[in-house]
Image (cartoon, rainbow, N blue to C red):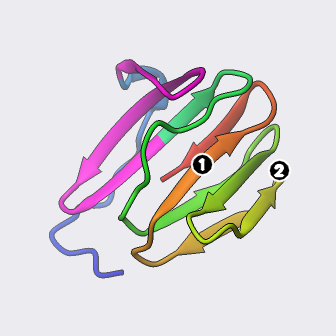
Amino acid sequence: MQIQNLAAGITDWNRVPLQHEPGQSGTASARTREFGGIKLRLVDYSPGYQADHWCDKGHIVHVIEGSLVIAHRDGRRFTLTPGLTYHVPIRKIRIAFLAPAEREFL
């Protein structure tokens, strides 16, 4: 990852506006900051949330609470629990969450 022209700083997530995004089922409530070409998100997913699209972007996902399943188009699944981090280069993925109060950094 190349991070250029980014000054050192701190994000107070409580001051970042909350946006609600419906999925195929459930809702993602996200706070988003963008730094050049990098998007950093803190997301709370409702129970049973399932993404409504496949994503082509690379991801780094860190689970703070709850658990989640990341499903790839080819059928592979990865289950994450608190403290685990998932990373993938550009690829088609769909994310389905299994429990309330999950959080994800993207």
At label 1, which amino acid type do we have? Ile
Q: Is residue 46 magenta?
A: no
Nearer the observer, 57 or 101: 57
Q: Quadrant of residue 25?
A: top right
* Residue that appears at 55% across and 52% down: 94
Instruction: Name the side, left or right, on which 11 lies relative to 33.
Output: right
Nearer the observer, 50 or 4: 50
> Element at badge 1?
strand
At label 2, which amino acid type do we have? Pro
- Counting from the top left corner in percent of width and height, residue 86 is at 66, 67
> Element at badge 2?
loop
Residue position for label 1: 95
Residue position for label 2: 82
* Residue that appears at 42% across and 44% down: 53
Relative height, residue 55 to residue 30 (above, below): below
Q: Is residue 88 visible?
A: yes
Is tag 2's residue or tag 1's residue first in the polypeptide sequence?
2
- Counting from the top left corner in percent of width and height, residue 54 is at 43, 53
Relative height, residue 50 to residue 18 (above, below): below
- Counting from the top left corner in percent of width and height, residue 75 is at 68, 67
The range drawn in magenta is 17-41
Q: CA distance from mark 2 to mark 1?
A: 16 Å
Q: Is residue 84 visible?
A: no
* Residue that appears at 35% across and 20% down: 17
Instruction: Name the side, left or right, on which 14 lies relative to 97.
Output: left
